[in-house]
Amino acid sequence: MTSAFSPKFMKVGILTAALQELTPRDVRDADPDRAIEDWLAFGRDLGADYIQLSAALHPSESDVPPEAMLDPVANTLDLRQPFDQARATRVQAAVASTGTRISDLAYFDNLLHHDAPTRQKKHDFLLRVFDAAVLLGVDAVCGFVGRNQQRSMDENLVDFEQQFVPLLKEVKSRGLTYRVEQCPMPGWTTGDNWHNNIAYTPGAWIPLHRICEKHGVGDQFRIHYDPSHAILMGQDTRSIFQFLKDQGYGFLIGGFHVKGQVIDSAGVAAWGYGGQTMERGDWIGGKPPPRPADQLNAWKKQVVLCEHELPGTARHDPLAYLQNRTVDWLDHQLAARELLPLDVANTYLIVEHEYPAARIQDRERLKPILQGSLAFVRRIDEAAACMYALQHEVLAAQSIPIQGVGRQAYRS
């Protein structure tokens, strides 16, 4: 008996936060959908099949000043005014003319904020994102859960049930899925909470999903997995996927952010993973400073330990792979195929650019960098697809064993 060699590739795209100033702020404020048109054309030039369209509260409306943010505000999708059918038709025309499609929409904010009016403002905005997703014909929105920073993790499970589940019911009524990126967001607060997005790890995803199931929205809650955050937690992709499979929750992974993390071993020696740093500069005179730029120093809780990697920009380091200090991209893509029940051909790999040294708000300088990273991601996925098809389909059909051992879960 034989099996044809038929590798299945994932869909490759990029999050539009990679270049917030592609369309200058004064231009896109006056003509909001120009930013989407420009990004669809730029995505084509980069070699991306898709863009993940980033939405955010406009700087004039956000509770967090732009100066306190690690990255510029990425409101490529501007929702100060309703996104109606006329706007959707304009965007769909740009999709048709460029050939670049939209994978999903993204809005990253703290949806369990302790202040009720602030939280309601974020929820209202998210509902507008859901409505825009429907008009644009995409089936998912990507974002965070967040955390009430004044309450314990267990108390946040109650907040999730009371405040977040109603949002998932709105997701369900629109035929959408909500995919949670698992970043712990340590810099969201000048306090010492390190885990400010409670959906940061598989051990949390499972009880959150059980709450969702209890309320009939289990199918709407999925994870947009980002391996950079696993590295930040001392985890590795293969072990996480194996754990989910062992627990019967492999189905939770619904898409991927392709972003790496390069751990600074000296930083780990100084503070440890998730360690509470001191003298960051986000406390002055015994309290958080009034100047937003000083509050940005809260992110030193994370950046003293590591630096984000744009895929393809970090040196190949087998020892770092084994010690979970950076992402083993080939095994990441193999593990996804081997351990998760994915519809591979309809799964998105979305490049998320946050490599500080290359955070360039200049189209022509950034363009070849993003082109190279996207090409790397595509070829890594193609290599993994070919290996998987050859080993697990072609050889398996003829009862020919796979050679060697390979990377194993729960080992480092």
Image (spheres, rainbow, N blue to C red):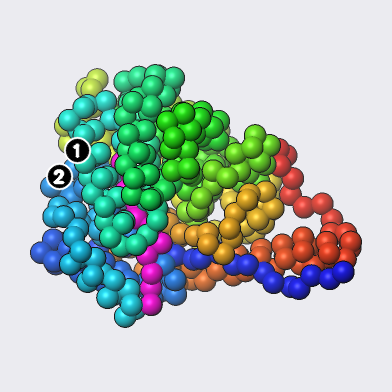
Residue 342 position in % (x across, y down): 59, 54
Q: How far apart are labels 2 and 1 at the CA level?
A: 9 Å
Above/below status of 272 relative to 66 = above
Closer to the camera in the image, 400 or 315 = 400
Q: Which residue is mark 1?
A: 121
The residue drawn where x is 77% and y is 52% is 406
Residue 238 visible, this orientation: yes
In the drawing, what numbered circle is on residue 61? Answer: 2
Mark 2 vs 1: CB contact within 8 A: yes
Write down the region rendered in magenta: 99-109
Q: Position of residue 333 (x, y in %)?
A: 62, 57
User: On the picture, is 39 further left or further right than 347?
Assistant: left
**Residue drawn at x 77%, y 60% as measured from the top left:** 392
Q: Residues within 10 Å of mark 1 (few under 14, many from 20)?
A: some
Q: Nearer the viewer, residue 22 or 201?
A: 201
Can I make out residue 329 in this image? no
For label 1, the SS is helix
Q: Main secondary structure of the magenta part?
A: strand
Residue type, numbered disc 2: Glu
Q: Position of residue 374 (x, y in %)?
A: 48, 68
Q: Is residue 282 magenta?
A: no
If you read the primary sequence from the N terminus, does the residue marked by circle 2 or circle 1 appear first? 2
Residue at figure coordinates x 84%, y 71% from the top left: 2
Q: Which three-letter amino acid code belongs to the residue tagged 1?
A: Lys
In the image, residue 185 above or below residue 74: above
User: For the point 42% across and 31% down, which residue is it?
Assistant: 215
Which quarter shows the C terminus?
A: top right
Relative horizontal placement of residue 125, taking residue 108 as reference (left or right): left
Q: For residue 159, what is the image quadrant?
A: top left
Residue nearest the viewer, comparing 345 with 137: 137
Asked whether 293 or 16 is in front, the reply is: 16
